Amino acid sequence: MKRETITLTTRKGNVSYIPFKRYFVHLMLAGIILARLSANAKGDPQGKSNASEQDNNVDTFSAGFLFDRFKLTLEDGFRTEAAGPFYYSQEADSGNVWAIPPLFSDYHNPSLEAQEYDSLYPLFTDGRYGHERRWQFFQILNFSWGLEPDDASVKQFTLFPLYFQQRSTDTNLNYTAFIPFYGRLKHRLFKDEIYFIMFPGYVETRKRDVVTDNYLFPLVDVHHGDGMQGWQVWPFVGREHKVITTVTNGFGDAVTIPGHDHSFYMWPFYFSQDNGIGSDDPEKLRASIPLFAYTRSPERDATTVLWPLFTVIDDRSRKYHEWQMPWPLIIFARGEGKHTSRVFPLFSQSHNDVKEQDSYVWPLYIYSRLHSDPLDQRRDRVLFFLYYRFAVKNTETGHQRVRLDMWPFFEWHRDFNGDERLQVLAPLEPAVPDNSRIERNWSSLWSVWRAQESPERHTSSQSLLWNLYRHDTGPDFKKVSVFFGVYQSERQAKARKIRLFYIPIVHSHPK
């Protein structure tokens, strides 16, 4: 094959050379091939071997950006990286993965019987968990199958939003729906069953014992079940009545389900509701929006005039009084159960015995806290995720887990056991925190600096520009690699190795 060259004419004559770009691509491809061969040689490429058993036997090698193989810092196992951010494989007790970001990744965890394939995530994903499997293409094509609690196998296929199909060994679970013409759905869209003809012409839905027949959905319907009867021609008129019923709970005791009466005329200009009929706290609501609305019950009274301009609430069960003028912009509440001062968006302060929520020049700064021993959880935000800090503390042990993001500059984590991770440049991670698939498929492309430390394992690592510089330390070793591995230094126990241009120049052994 003829080798491509470029010829330049200079005063001293013609000079020919091979383009550096082509050499660079060849080196990257060679690094990927070497990485795959190394993975196959050192361990099971399907990730079925035990990483902790192999960790002590793995040979580390460094060529920086082109190829690097090193032990993991936060757990037993090892990782191989090649061609900068465009290839890596990792084998650990928590799972095994190999990827060509952002084109493809393959994650496998034998102990959990879990496997995930991604291609240009989130364009295509394929996940398997035990007997369950689901794949999707851009959330338009979806296919899944698995087992029901009674061991009946179920397969679902969806071409959203046009076609829905389910097939099962239990034929009672079968359905087909071709929207908008005809079909039946089961346990979809928050309903137990949906049947339709020429949607929205006619739709029948069932939720537990309540059946609703819709005509010109959602304008006209008739519904019944569970002691309830109702109908509506929205927004003109509607009525619903439910009698008091009883059910038997899991302990065999009879439990009373309160009844209610609802009606409206020219909604929302007038509607009324009587809730909790037969209970200890029956509630009466009357409203003509925007003129007035009021609620009366033994535990709570609320009155609104010219909604939403003026509202007064007296909550006797939670022991507080609240004034809204108008809701939700200006709110003041005082009492044991709630203390709120809000002039939105300038400031908002709200707290009770368990929760606290504050904001100043929303969304410039937002703060929330949940404290209920042994849980103490705190969240701080500046412009949603421009700055984000989330901390969870166990008040009994004093241990805490912390996540800190500064978009798009970095993300930092510390786990309950003290393990720390830092990634510099994080354009997606703060917006979708704790997304393992983002980390597998995209994070390596822009993580120009990575640092990890485990106080419990006495290990740490730092990597700059995809291992152009890399530093690893452990309880009995220290390793440094600089500029494609041109300089490498390694100390283990009392032995020391130094390589320059991959040639050993120092190789000392303990006496």
Image (spheres, rainbow, N blue to C red):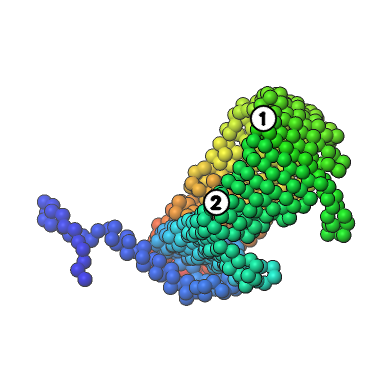
**Above/below status of 68 relative to 363:** below
Q: Which residue is mark 2?
A: 199
| Residue 273 at least partly seen | yes
299 sits left or right of 294 in the view: right
Any mark on residue 269, and which? Answer: 1
Classify mark 2: helix, strand or loop: loop
**Residue 205 x, y percent position in the rendering:** 65, 53
**Residue 125 x, y percent position in the rendering:** 50, 61
Q: Residue at x 21, y 66 (%)?
A: 3
**Above/below status of 432 relative to 53:** above
Looking at the rendered structure, the kind of residue marked 2 is Phe
For the residue pair 374 and 55, the one nearer the viewer reads as 374
**Residue 129 x, y percent position in the rendering:** 60, 67
Classify mark 1: helix, strand or loop: loop
Mark 1 burial class by Cα count in 10 Å: few <14, some 14-19, many 20+: some
Q: Residue at x 52, y 56 (%)?
A: 181
For the residue pair 501 and 256, the one nearer the viewer reads as 256
Q: Using the rendered view, name the quadrant where residue 252 is placed.
A: bottom right
Q: Are marks 2 and 1 in contact (CB under 8 Å)?
A: no
Q: Quadrant of the N terminus?
A: bottom left
Looking at the rendered structure, the kind of residue marked 1 is Phe
Q: Quadrant of the C terminus?
A: bottom right
- Give whichever of discs 2 and 1 has the lower sequence position: 2
Any mark on residue 31, and which? Answer: none
**Residue 436 x, y percent position in the rendering:** 56, 57
Q: Residue at x 64, y 40 (%)?
A: 233
Mark 2 burial class by Cα count in 10 Å: few <14, some 14-19, many 20+: some
Q: Using the rendered view, name the quadrant where residue 54 is placed.
A: bottom right
**Above/below status of 19 relative to 381:** below
Q: CA distance from mark 2 to mark 1?
A: 29 Å
| Residue 76 at least partly seen | no
